[in-house]
Every structure is written in structure tokens, then in C-alpha cells.
Image (cartoon, rainbow, N blue to C red):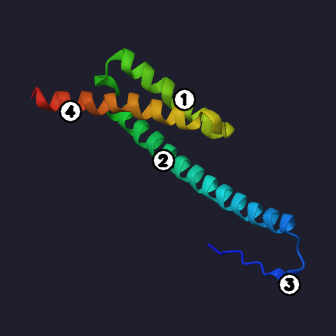
Amino acid sequence: SQSVRITAQSGLTETEIDAIITEAQEHQESDQARKDKADLLNRAEALIYTTEQSITEYGAELDQVDLELIQSDLNNLKEALKNEDNERFADLLKALETSAYRIAETIYGQEQSG
């Protein structure tokens, strides 16, 4: 990241210098926010994909209640993705991660029992 070095002979007042520094910091924060959002989107898309694959493969073996919960969480996340609903996005992602985990538990449980 570039550092902003301002010298006295630039003719700027201290207030103007502070404003420039503040603006530079705000840009840095919004860049980080954009990066975080991109990471979230990538995680969401990967999770949606793997969850849909798992439902296709193992849906019949899942408990009906679990399956409905997973599909509900999946649809909520897909909606949020489509509408760029950033406020609820992280929560919906977490919800699907949690409910989709039941697929793994079901599969693993069946492998254990023979």
C-alpha cells in the first residue's frame, strides 16, 4: 500500500492534510471490505454448488425435516446472492454451512453403521 507523505512546502493547511490522510484510510478500508465481500461471495457460490450436488446425491437418505431446512437455507442464500443483500449475507451463509453439515453427518453415520 502506498503511504502518503506530505511536506510542509506543499502549501496545504493542516486541516487539508488531515482530510487527505483520512480519505486515504477510508479507501484502504473500502478496498478491504470489497475483498472481504468477494471472499464471502466465492465461499457462498462454492457452498451452494456442493450443497446442491450433495442433495442430488444423498437427498433420498436425508431426514425430511433436515432436507427441508437445508433447501430453505440454500434458497435464502441464493436469493441474497441474486439481490446482493449484503446485510444478511454472512448470516445466511453461516446458516447453510450449519444445516448442510447434516448431510455430512448423515452420510458419515450411514458409513459407520455398515
Residue picked out by circle 1: 75
From this viewpoint, which residue is outermost toward the left?
114
Q: Mark 1 or mark 3: which comes first in sequence?
A: 3
Residue picked out by circle 4: 108
The span from disc 1 to disc 2 (Cα, nearest Å) is 15 Å
- The answer to whether marks 1 and 2 mark residues whose Cβ atoms lie closer than 8 Å is no
- The answer to whether marks 3 and 4 mark residues whose Cβ atoms lie closer than 8 Å is no
- The quadrant in which residue 12 appears is bottom right
Position of 96 relative to 19 (above/below): above
The span from disc 2 to disc 3 (Cα, nearest Å) is 49 Å
- The answer to whether marks 1 and 4 mark residues whose Cβ atoms lie closer than 8 Å is no
Q: Position of residue 17 (x, y in %)?
A: 81, 69
Q: Mark 2 or mark 3: which comes first in sequence?
A: 3
- The answer to whether marks 2 and 4 mark residues whose Cβ atoms lie closer than 8 Å is no
Position of 25 relative to 71 (above/below): below
Under mark 1, the amino acid is Asn
* Number of the front mark, 2 or 3: 3
- Nearer-the-camera pick, 9 or 32: 9
From this viewpoint, which residue is outermost toward the top?
65
Residue picked out by circle 2: 43
Residue at point 44%, 42% (across, down): 47
Q: In which quarter of the image is the N terminus?
A: bottom right
The span from disc 2 to disc 4 (Cα, nearest Å) is 23 Å
Label 2: how many Cα within 10 Å (few below 14, some 14–19, many 20+): few
Residue picked out by circle 3: 9
